[in-house]
Amino acid sequence: MLLGSEKSMKEVHALLLTGGSAFGLASADGVMRYCEEHAIGYRTPWGRVPIVPAAVVFDLNVGSARVRPTADAGYRACHAASADERRGGLIGAGTGTTVGKWRGFEYAMPGGIGFSSAQVGEITVTALAVVNAIGDIHDEDGTILAGARSPDGQWLARSMSYTEALYASHPPLTNTTLVAVLTNAALDKVDANRAAQRMHDGFARAIQPVHTTHDGDVSFVLASGQVSVPFEVVAEAAAVVSAAAIRNAVRPER
């Protein structure tokens, strides 16, 4: 894997989070085209090659399975990108996301995209989450923000344990939560991967149950390297903003 700590590549030029299951990876072509047009990429003797990691959620079971992100969609997304963009909810990669599928898809609620940012001294740590989890989304105090509900609107987790429900039911294999953390901290590749692992502490604080066999969760850390700071500061901040971004994806105020 190119992003593995033991691999030589140490730079990333864009990151794509998308819907459409594996079909949505076509939008990476558009991101590559945009980067090439702007001379963004890894320098080789034959030209610059954009390094664009990508991850997708499975959302073909929401709306039309024939509507998927395309290469043109990825290209237009690059042109529309803004440092001030903070919209969340059911947009972009979050359009077809759902949560609370541990009891079955018929009890699920919408997921979405969420943001969160923390300032610790001179460093900024920001998370973007695309939430398509099998589990319920829990607030810091343990209350459920979104998840499996009965027809009368009651949280199913109040009347049965997750363990009992998973034993008795067959959850759909359509779940993935993607979180990208961006920071101005100086991290080498090993520490960036370590921080990406620690982000999953944040997943576990916000999602129950989390990291099941039916989930395909992915975390990314991108560090621009302007500020030197102890690793533990960045790692814990990454976990905190990851949890907050997941929660914000389903909050009514986003």
Image: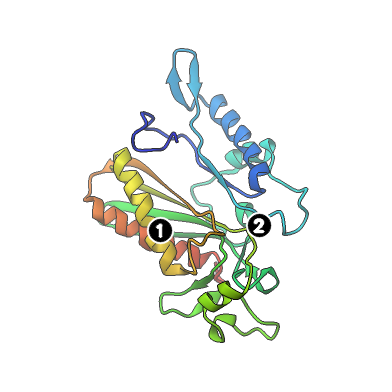
Considering only vertical position in the picture, is 193 above or below 148? Answer: above
**Amino acid type of the residue tagged 1 in the rendering:** His
Q: Residue at x 63, y 58 (%)?
A: 174
Q: Which residue is mark 2?
A: 95
Choose top left, top right, bottom left or bottom right for residue 250. Answer: bottom right
Q: Quadrant of the N terminus?
A: top left
- Counting residues from the start of the chain, the first of labels 2 and 1 encountered is 2
**Of the numbered discs in the image, which one, if any, rests on residue 62?**
none
Q: Residue at x 57, y 65 (%)?
A: 134
Q: Quadrant of the C terminus?
A: bottom right
**Could you tell me how many numbered marks the image carries?**
2
Q: Which residue is mark 1?
A: 200
Distance from label 2 to label 1 (Cα)? 23 Å
Q: Nearer the viewer, mark 2 or mark 1?
A: 1
Q: Residue at x 24, y 55 (%)?
A: 232
Please state if 215 lies on the left or on the right of 182 as rendered: right
Where does the image place residue 145, in percent across and percent down from the top left? Answer: 53, 75
Where does the image place residue 16, in percent across and percent down from the top left? Answer: 54, 43
SS type, badge 1 = helix
